[in-house]
């Protein structure tokens, strides 16, 4: 069974940085695009960033472009999200999600991690 | 960016009854439409993609229909485990966007 396990969430002050990781298993990691989706408390879902299977192509929501960086290490089956210049409005549960395929996203997300809570507050 | 609008915001249904959830796109997304179910404290779960293709193992009481800008998720006979929030998502163009969700609760 596909597993996605996020880590790295926590409390950070406005303007600070945090790095999320997502350890993937039980599928050929490099063959699929991967996406970070976030959900603010009591709110809906927002796609934050997607990365192609090779890591060569990345996509960002306007709300995070220039502040967040998505990357992956296919040798370690791990996805990352480096978050800089954090704002209160970035407070959310961040989910790592597996795209249905690789190629030209977006695609449906067929597996999700359990989520990592990021709280931005002074 | 394609805006997805779901209705109603809350749907109160008795167990065994039929539930019909609607989703509208601000521009055509073809059949590039998915539905997700989310229960409290859990990650979303993919139910339907391609507007009408059920995920592996999904009970037949769930069905999706529509194309272009108008879509429907129907749950033919609600079971206790179906009470949750349902989101539609378009994946026709980046960024993929979700509706605000429809909460299906017990009447």
Image (cartoon, coloured by chain):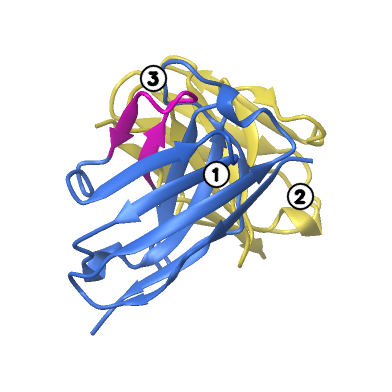
Picture coordinates of residue A43 (x, y %)?
40, 61
Per the image, the residue denoted by label 2 is: B78
Which residue occupies 50% across, 28% down?
A: A33
The label nearer to you, 3 versus 2, is: 3
Of marks 1 and 2, the one in the foreground:
1
For label 3, the crowd category at 10 Å Cα-Cα, with few meaning under 14, some 14 to 19 and many 20 or more, is some
Foreground residue, B83 or A111? A111
Q: Is residue A23 magenta?
A: no
Q: Nearer the viewer, mark 1 or mark 3?
A: 1
Pointer 2 indicates a residue of which chain? B
Residue B35 rendering spot, x and y as whole percentages: 57, 36
Q: Report the residue marked by disc 3.
A: B29
Magenta span covers which residues?
Answer: A47-60
Query: Is the residue marked by circle 2 packed among few (<14), some (14-19), or many (20+) residues within 10 Å?
Result: many
Q: How far apart, in angstroms, are the residues tagged by discs 1 and 3?
A: 31 Å
The quarter holding residue A38 reads bottom left
């Amino acid at each position: 069974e596909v597993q996605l396990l996020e880590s790295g969430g926590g409390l950070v002050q406005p303007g600070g940085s945090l790095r999320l990781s997502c350890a993937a298993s039980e599928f050929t990691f490099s063959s699929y695009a991967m996406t970070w989706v976030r959900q603010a408390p009591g709110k809906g879902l927002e796609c934050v960033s997607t990365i192609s299977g090779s890591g060569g192509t990345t996509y960002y929501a306007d709300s995070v472009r220039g502040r967040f960086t998505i990357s992956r290490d296919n040798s370690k089956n791990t996805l990352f999200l480096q978050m800089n210049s954090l704002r209160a409005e970035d407070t959310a549960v961040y989910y790592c999600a597996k795209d249905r395929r690789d190629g030209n996203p977006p695609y449906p997300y067929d597996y999700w991690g359990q989520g990592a809570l990021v709280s931005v507050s002074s | 960016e394609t805006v997805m609008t779901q209705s109603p915001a809350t749907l109160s249904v008795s167990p065994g009854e039929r539930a019909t959830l609607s989703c509208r796109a601000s521009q055509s997304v073809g059949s590039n439409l998915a539905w997700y179910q989310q229960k409290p404290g859990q990650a979303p779960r993919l139910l339907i993609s391609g507007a009408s293709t059920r995920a592996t193992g999904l009970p037949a009481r769930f069905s999706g229909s529509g194309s272009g800008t108008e879509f429907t998720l129907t749950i033919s006979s609600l079971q206790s485990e179906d009470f949750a929030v349902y989101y539609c998502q378009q994946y026709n163009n980046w960024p993929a966007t979700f509706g605000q969700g429809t909460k299906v609760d017990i009447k």
